[in-house]
Amino acid sequence: MNALPYDEALRLDRARRLVATTRELAALGWTPATSSNFSMRMDDRHAAITVSGRDKGRLALEDIMVVDFDGRAVGSDHRPSAETLLHTQLYRRYPDIGCVLHTHSHNQTVASRLWAGQGHVHLAGYELLKAFRGNATHEMAVELPVLPNNQDMPALAAQVEHLLDRGPMWGYLIDGHGLYAWGRDMDEARRHLDAFEFLLACELDLRRLNA
Amino acid sequence: MNALPYDEALRLDRARRLVATTRELAALGWTPATSSNFSMRMDDRHAAITVSGRDKGRLALEDIMVVDFDGRAVGSDHRPSAETLLHTQLYRRYPDIGCVLHTHSHNQTVASRLWAGQGHVHLAGYELLKAFRGNATHEMAVELPVLPNNQDMPALAAQVEHLLDRGPMWGYLIDGHGLYAWGRDMDEARRHLDAFEFLLACELDLRRLNA
Amino acid sequence: MNALPYDEALRLDRARRLVATTRELAALGWTPATSSNFSMRMDDRHAAITVSGRDKGRLALEDIMVVDFDGRAVGSDHRPSAETLLHTQLYRRYPDIGCVLHTHSHNQTVASRLWAGQGHVHLAGYELLKAFRGNATHEMAVELPVLPNNQDMPALAAQVEHLLDRGPMWGYLIDGHGLYAWGRDMDEARRHLDAFEFLLACELDLRRLNA
Amino acid sequence: MNALPYDEALRLDRARRLVATTRELAALGWTPATSSNFSMRMDDRHAAITVSGRDKGRLALEDIMVVDFDGRAVGSDHRPSAETLLHTQLYRRYPDIGCVLHTHSHNQTVASRLWAGQGHVHLAGYELLKAFRGNATHEMAVELPVLPNNQDMPALAAQVEHLLDRGPMWGYLIDGHGLYAWGRDMDEARRHLDAFEFLLACELDLRRLNA
């Protein structure tokens, strides 16, 4: 028999937390039509991630699979999402990243379309900017990058690497697609996700109000 | 005694799934004021469909009736919805269609009013276009037709037949009325419905934002 | 001892249904800051109505009091809402009205401000117009009146009487205040309320979209 | 051993009510990304207040700490929120204030950005103005002040003192940050909070509608 190359108790722990968070985000309407995917680091070679194509509001523990940092299935024949590579590139590059959340909310999608041309969304003047690790004041602006969409994942991952070379960041948008946000653990990744969503909603509304 | 011309266990199976889905859609506010109707194929002559005029948030198993593909009640004296014909024409024409969902959401209604003049809504540039069966990339646009509203159901059904003659499609809007969406099974029909709703919401908002 | 001039079992029946509906409407956000009130006819002289000033999301059976058709408390010393008269004038005038629902939703309030100047909201071209009793087609328009707000209830009630003299109707708005909707029973009043809310939301959005 | 300088049963009573209200407000989305804080008076020297940095949707009884009116922790080594001073200045100045609620809703944040330049939001013509203690008619306008944001809490508190010198008020906005609202007890503070939120939403929407 083949021993699993990872700790199954660890997979189950990650699965429980990913399923709970994913159901919350689905209830908010941020994972329409089986889209979106969510992962947590297990160790220095493996991550637990949602399998492809499931309704995120009905996820079960067996819908969380294990992948290596090249995005390949480990210990199962589940099909990983095409976008697995966008998760694992973060775990490989940054040992202190523990969780990556990718959602498709209305505000994220609309903001990505609206600001794709300028390549980023400028977020400034909000108390909630303090939600991002390292920001101690509302006076520090955040530039959220917007990448062009691409079905070629290695090409998209290479564009993300270029962004990451510029300095620390906690998320990016893909045009017409959605948001990637991350953090050292699930709580921090969720706080960053919630803050991006809130700030994008405010920026969109200020534009509707011609402010 | 008269034997039922369909399998009652099959009706009950369909009723359970229709009631569960209908309650979810009612909770989203997509079935205002007892509107909307939902069906599943039973066999090559019968479909199970919601009876007319009930509050869709309080549907019970006995509120799902059986109709033949001419839209006539079978095995009960329930009154089928006037729009039953728009469901059964799809089951008759396409043997692989298993579920038809018709909702009246705010976004569907507003989009139908806004784009009735041009006769369709152009949906392009969204990752979520991949939610429609047969679409493998965000680069494939979808044209969602908008038909004029009509209380004469055979006339409306004839207009739909003309649309279907043009090629495969997964839904259409009726002006001031709502959306029909369908799929091979309940999961696929629901994924198509959710994707149309999401994309219409984005298109409306981009217009509000003058994008 | 004084016998109650009404049937207590009837009050309890009405109270159960009013509390259930009121909690649903509160959960939708249509009763902000203890506003709104709801009633059902008991007999040809009494109605059951929510007492004044309670959080509508936490209503209990004892928060439903009995009033006569002059709006005076019967069988209790509860304080009836100042607007009780706007409910009882409908029960007195129309023996077939069984339920009156008064809410303060965002859309109702904004629409009342926007169209107070022209004195009504024109609702046309929607399938959901069929939700109003007596309407068989989307081709019948509905004019929803908008009255000026007034803290003098007898004066406001007199304005409503003038409106009612013009012909049958199922609701009216008060400027900056909210909607009154009614029907022969709770289900019909609720269907009318939901239809007005939905149609006002559509009309507001079409204006936002410059349609 | 050191006796606590406050009544622990009182802390528990306040904690139960603060946790219940905080969870409701979190479910409304008014406390994004661990923001917002909530307090109740205990006696003439102490208040119970939410500790800093917790997810407000998952608050437990031990997440409510005691502070004195200088904003210092009493009887625990929990870290009080930086904004504790904005709560305690109200308890010190007004013996009849019993509850202070500070939230970061979308509408509060957007309105604060939009009207920061003019320094206040003018609220007039709404029935719901009667929700504020002391207002008996929709004809009394309310001016909701908007203060510049500031990470220096004593400086911000001094600005609030200037506002309070002008006369009685039930809330203020901070630019890009959120709303403070208060009342004699939890119910009144909540009613004021709900009324401000509702009225800001209406004012924003009337501007979107160019009304």
Image (spheres, coloured by chain):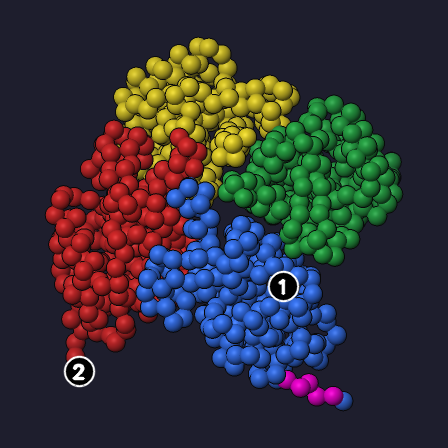
Chain colours: A yellow, B red, C blue, D green
Vertically, is C102 above or below A30? below
Residue C169: x percent and y percent?
47, 69
Q: Which residue is at 39% across, 44% downward?
A: C211
Task: Describe the element under mark 2 as helix, strand or loop.
Answer: loop
Magenta segment boundaries in residue numbering: C2-6
Whether C81 is drawn above or below A193: the answer is below
Q: Residue at x 39, y 17 (%)?
A: A160
Answer whether residue D34 is visible to the viewer in this image: no
Foreground label between 1 and 2: 1
- Given residues C104 and C14, the one toward you in this image is C104
Determine which quarter of the picture holds residue B200: top left
- SS class of the residue under badge 1? loop
Residue A77 placement (x, y as % from top left) = 26, 32
User: Is B209 drawn above or below residue C140 in the view shown?
Assistant: above
Looking at the image, residue A137 sits to the left or right of residue A20; the answer is right
Horizontal side of residue A78 vs C186, given as left or right? left
Locate residue C10, reporting x and y percent. 58, 80
Q: Which mark is residue C59?
A: 1
Left or right of B91, for residue D20: right
Q: Residue at x 68, y 27 (%)?
A: D149
> Is residue D108 in the magenta section?
no
Q: Quadrant of residue C18?
A: bottom right
Magenta stretch prevailing secondary structure: loop
- Residue C131 pos. (x, y %): 39, 65
Q: In the picture, which quadrant includes the C terminus of chain D?
A: top right
| Amino acid type at mark 1 | Leu
Q: Which residue is mark 2?
A: B1
